[in-house]
Amino acid sequence: MFGPMMNQFGGMFGMGGGSMNEMIEKMTTTLESVKKMNAQFKDPDCTTFVCVCIAEFLSLYETERLIQELTKQGIDTHNIIVNQLLFPDTDKDGKVTCRKCGSRQAIQSKYLSEIDELYEDFHVVKLPLLEAEVRGGPEILKFSERMVDPKLNEQSK
């Protein structure tokens, strides 16, 4: 009765029809590995979780849920990246030249204020919406510099 079920479990653990003792040994080894990984995830000197969101309602809501859940699990989450921020062009009087861009910026500003309020003790990096997709090693390296030097993001405004 249990034979087919045990064979199925054995297949899940890469046992291919091994004995019960082999299966228990494999499960014990797997459990030890999971416990080590769990300890590493909870060690802020070893691991931190960086949340990435955009300045919109649903993304902010899901980020807050994620942070709460990771915090319950004892995982460091004090880093947030807010991506795809719009800094529209303005005319000589400072008026936004594109109505849709101005509207989107107003929405983002509202959620940026909420992010600043909710996560005042977090490290928050605000990244601009770029004209091109970030692909390939050199582009990723260039983009990553924006995460450590906020002045580069201000130049995109």
Image (cartoon, rainbow, N blue to C red):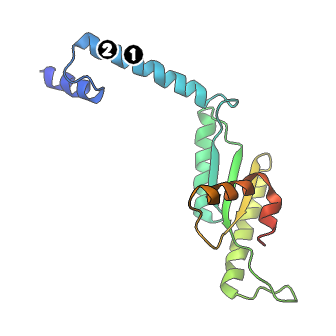
Residue in front for this viewpoint, 107 or 154: 154
Viewer-closest of 97 and 113: 97
Circle 1 packing at 10 Å, graded few (<14), some (14-19), many (20+), is few
When the figure is inspected, residue 3 is found, relative to residue 53, above or below; the finding is above
Residue extending farthest to the front is 138
Q: Are marks 1 and 2 in contact (CB under 8 Å)?
A: yes
Give the secondary structure at mark 1: helix
- Give above or below for 82 relative to 73: below
Q: Residue at x 70, y 72 (%)?
A: 86
The disc labelled 1 sits on which kind of residue? Answer: Thr
User: Which numbered marker is on residue 28?
Assistant: 1
Q: Which amino acid is tagged 2?
A: Ile
State the separation of the CA atoms marked 1 and 2. 6 Å
Q: Going 70% across and 87% down the picture, which residue do you hit? A: 98
Q: Is residue 108 left or right of residue 69?
A: right
Say few, some or many: other residues with alpha carbon within 10 Å of mark 2 (under 14 / 14 to 19 / 20 or more). few
Mark number, residue 87: none
Residue 1 location, x and y as percent? 11, 21
Tell me where residue 90 appears, x and y as whole percent.
Answer: 80, 84
Picture disc at residue 24: 2
**Can residue 60 be spotted in the picture?**
no
Q: Position of residue 72 (x, y in %)?
A: 61, 35
Q: Quadrant of the C terminus?
A: bottom right
Quarter location, residue 40? top right
